Amino acid sequence: MSYTIEPVRTDDASIATMTALLRQVFPHAAHFTEEVVRWQYRDNPDGPAVGFNAWSGSELAAHYVTIPLVARVNGVEERGLLSLNTATHPSHQGKGLFTKLANATYEAAAQQGFGFVIGVANANSTHGFTKKLGFQLVSPLRAMLGIGPIVNNRDGVVKYERIWHQKALEWRLAHPLNKYSLGLTTCKDLLFTERKQMGATLLLAALDPGTAPASTPSHEHFEPLRVWIGLDSRITWRFRPYFNIPMRLRPSPLNLIFKDLKSQGRTLDPATVRFQAIDFDTL
């Protein structure tokens, strides 16, 4: 069977078609709505989605997309991509379409000046990214469950972190389905979401003081049990009432992956990465 490989488009009709495939492949994923996909693919102030679709005649057979971001890598600000959504129609699985779409995406992204792709892969997809697409498995993410504020060690070395300029942060907090709020007075740098993870309130981010938009509402009730997901050597966990949830108790391991698009063989040291739920969890 032959397929036509085409770049992703973000007009309303294309958004509707891609959303329909995502919903068909992931029928229990409530976040795959046209409103959310439009927010992800078209409204991002860092740029429209970069990706490819595979067509079998007029039928969308497979889809893969990344979305732009800005990060500081080894002290230099550059444009990169977050690996986001992938889906293959049940009738077209096992044809290697994801690999073809991903390679087409990374080639086009490099030509457009993007320096890297970063993402979070679960247990099922990690092997495909690392063995077939040349990604580095940087590290499993921490999932810290506990109570109380998070303490930052400002002296920690950071060689990779997402840059949340004001427009990008306002877009990120304008998720069509999820609502966010700042922490209580004693921890205003904690950004909460109403979503639950592993039975606890998800901390979207431990923000640097004063970086959250003034319009972000304050958290109105005390949420004693919290979960923070990510990597950040600047956070001090020692002697804090938090523990790293064992892998056997998690729904699926979350692995940070990285691919250099500059043909320089760059890799990330997990000890120098600052990466939180705000940087990847766009559900």
Image (cartoon, rainbow, N blue to C red):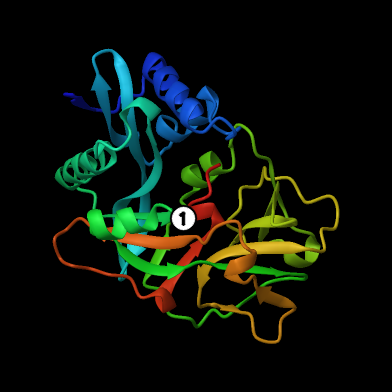
- Seen in the picture, residue 195 relative to 54 is either above or below; the reply is below
Residue closer to the observer: 84 or 185: 84
Query: Residue placed at 48% from the left, 81% from the top?
Result: 156
What residue does disc 1 label? 122
In-image side of 217 versus 165 (left or right): right
Q: Position of residue 237 (x, y in %)?
A: 64, 80
Q: Position of residue 246 (x, y in %)?
A: 62, 72
Query: Residue placed at 36% from the left, 52% from the top?
Result: 70
Point out the residue furthest to the bottom here.
239
Residue 47 location, quadrant: top left
Q: Position of residue 71 (x, y in %)?
A: 37, 58
- Seen in the picture, residue 247 relative to 115 is either above or below; the reply is below
The amino acid type, in three-letter code, at marker 1 is Asn
Residue closer to the observer: 233 or 85: 85
Query: Residue placed at 61% from the left, 62% from the top?
Result: 250
Residue 57 location, quadrant: top left
